[in-house]
Amino acid sequence: MLKKSTSKSALMVALVTGNVIWGGTVVHAEEPNQAFTLDPMVVTAQRMETRDLDTPAAVTVISSEEIKKSGAVNVDTLLAQQIGFNGMSYGPNGQEYGGSASRTKIRGLDKGTLVLVNGAPMNLLNYNAISNIPLDSIEKIEIVRGSNATLYGAEAMGGVINIITKKASGSAKTTISGTIGNYTDKWSVGHQNEYFSVYYDKDYYDEVNPQTRKFPYGEYASSSGSKKNNYNTLGKSRKESIFITGNIGKNLTLNYNHSKSDLNRFQITRSKAAADKLVFVAS
């Protein structure tokens, strides 16, 4: 009788323990689902699709959701938020004026950052115009820090930026957005369906008051010996950018990007010897 009672007690303990373990599993399964992207796929670092954890390089991936939440108005202002980046531009938000090209630098190396769009180089004489690509057209941006000259050539001594655009897919969807700022106003519209996608940006740049924002070029001596100061000021400007992508085959996609700018920059010369003499040179 004693053995029988002991056997029953052991059975009851086993059943109770099993219920506790099973109940714990059920509670864990009922926790709210959360999306975590801890190991995204990267194609830039080794020119093939590889998991981030298996990539022997310092890689940052900016997803389309992160781009929306960043508050950036173009690619230039988006990259300015990343660690290890610094750039130079002659106008607000990375704008270029004629031969005054903006630059993007990784880890402080000038003319050493290669910019790709879907793997195709965008650099021209070591400069690139990344602010002309509408943000809404970007699926993700891969940033590889450190020298990648072995894979991409001498222009990639500082690092590589690969801008991967969206492909036409899914049901028809149209989005409209706008931005208002001290120096820049813009509005954007995009349409996407399973055959093609179109994204359009229109930027408005306000005039910059030379009394509150000056860009000194330095001093020089004239023939009469008087000294003069040269300053830059920016007039009202406009810019339009469009990006179109379409599926023309099972594994073939056509991308088209076009930008048109009407940018104004003036040079102001102030003479110290006499009354101020203003000379405007538009570019």
Image: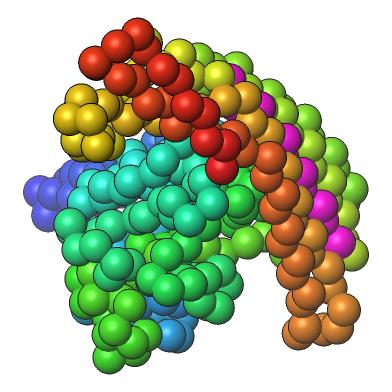
Q: Position of residue 20 (x, y in %)?
A: 29, 40
Dominant secondary structure of the magenta stretch? strand
Q: Nearer the viewer, residue 242 or 281?
A: 281
Q: Is residue 250 above or below residue 213?
A: below
Q: Is residue 57 visible?
A: no
Q: Is residue 149 visible?
A: yes
Q: State left or right for residue 219 relative to residue 172.
A: left
Q: Position of residue 38 (x, y in %)?
A: 35, 56
Q: State left or right for residue 7 relative to residue 184.
A: left
Q: Nearer the viewer, residue 192 or 121?
A: 121
Please provide the residue range marked out in magenta: 196-206
Q: Position of residue 100 (x, y in %)?
A: 44, 51
Q: Is residue 98 above or below residue 189?
A: below
Let me know if residue 128 is in the magenta part.
Answer: no
Let me know if residue 204 is in the magenta part.
Answer: yes
**Which residue is most to the bottom?**
150
